[in-house]
Amino acid sequence: MRSRETDEIFKILVAQLAYTIMPTTVMGLTISGIGLFAYDRVGNIELLLSVIVGGLASVAKIILMLAHRRFNATQQATVKQAVRWETFHSLLTFVVAGSVGWLASLIFLHGDLSLEVLATGLLFGYCAGVSSRIAVRPYLAATAIIIAALPAITCTALAGGSAHWLLTALFAMFLVAAMQSIWHAYHLSTRQICLRLEMECQARRDPLTGLCNRIALTEAFEALARDDDTLTCLHCFDLDGFKTINDRFGHVAGDELLAAIGKRLLDLQGAANIAVRMGGDEFVVLQPAVRNPADAEGLAATILNALRLPYVISGRPVAIGVSLGYTIERSANADLGTMMRLADAASYRVKRQGGGVDREVPPTLDLTCFSSAA
């Protein structure tokens, strides 16, 4: 199943296991109530043991879900952490399922009709709850239902008589239907999550260039590591002569040029850097975790040289100029608004000089602390 899910979908589905406290509480109370009633009627010590196991497992599962909820509220799980949470949920779910199957089997083997009615309700209720609430992890849900239902189905058949055989057939058909419900609910949840993730991605992407937008830039900046021994660099630039291309060749050609620029920036941005279209012909590249100011200067030159290379737009060769300004700040002190203002000032200054690269450094920043190359 994991091979069919992306890591993001897997983590979201596992996180949902933390939100079944009420059904788990109800099932724990039901197991305890029916089991204690049956023990009082029959006096079989195994009935009492099944109640103790099911009750303790239900309490442990509630505690696990509360811990999982607190975890979800403070951070997003890694894949390794999600696997660990899923394993804990699975083990406790299987213990509860085993107690349900054990209790129902003992009741059907005893042959008390009034207790069999209660055991039937317990088994149907448990399987219905699992197939609807834990279906986000289908193998977990299917295994739990088999653990709970298969022993009871076997014991019902062994009890003999037409009524028990009919009940066995009903249990078997319900088991098949529950499996189908699990997979249906799982696929529905997966489709809904995929749609939500796609919409979130589109909300943070510029549709023309495929680059990030302002929202994504703000979120990325807020998520930066605030280390005192690293620098954050912000490159701001726009295109020189873009209006002329629009006027001469039309807005379709202008859009084609912007898309081509976006592709080049995506090729350049690497794993850490984030390329952003702010709007029109204005772009930003966020360069985090810089240790040598020369790396920021090198990226600025790389962007400039790459974007100045000719383009073929609607079958015509087109060249464009770039005015790029960048600024650097200690990561611990970096503020997006301030850095945008400084980088824009450098960009406007170099544009008046005919294009190229310029830098604006905060007066409070001493770059010699990072590299003599500064």
Image (cartoon, grey):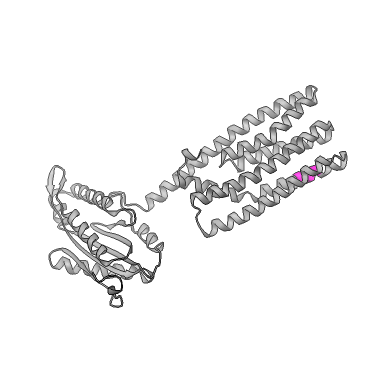
Q: Is 115 situated left or right of 318 in this image?
A: right
Q: Is 254 situated left or right of 159 in this image?
A: left
The mark total stands at: 0
User: Viewer-proximal residue, 72 or 3?
Assistant: 3
Q: Is 20 situated left or right of 342 in this image?
A: right
Q: Position of residue 133 (x, y in %)?
A: 61, 43
Q: What residue is at 81 percent from the left and 41 percent from the top?
A: 47
Residue 51 in the image: above or below residue 107: below
Q: What residue is at 16 percent from the left and 52 percent from the top?
A: 246
Q: Residue furthest front?
A: 372
Residue 324 in the image: above or below residue 269: below
Q: Position of residue 263 (x, y in %)?
A: 25, 49
Q: What residue is at 58 percent from the left and 58 percent from the top?
A: 70
Q: Residue furthest top?
A: 162
Q: Position of residue 313 (x, y in %)?
A: 16, 45
Is residue 32 inside the magenta stretch?
Answer: yes
User: Viewer-proximal residue, 89 or 221?
Assistant: 89
Where the C terminus falls, by quadrant?
A: bottom left
Q: Position of residue 300 (x, y in %)?
A: 22, 61
Let me know if residue 213 appears in the view. Answer: yes
Q: Residue furthest bottom?
A: 364
The quarter of the displayed image where residue 136 is located? top right
Let me know if residue 374 appears in the view. Answer: no
Is residue 175 inside the magenta stretch?
Answer: no
User: Viewer-proximal residue, 359 or 289?
Assistant: 289
- Classified by dominant secondary structure, the portion drawn in magenta counts as helix
The stretch in magenta equals: 31-35
Q: Is 48 situated left or right of 142 in this image?
A: right
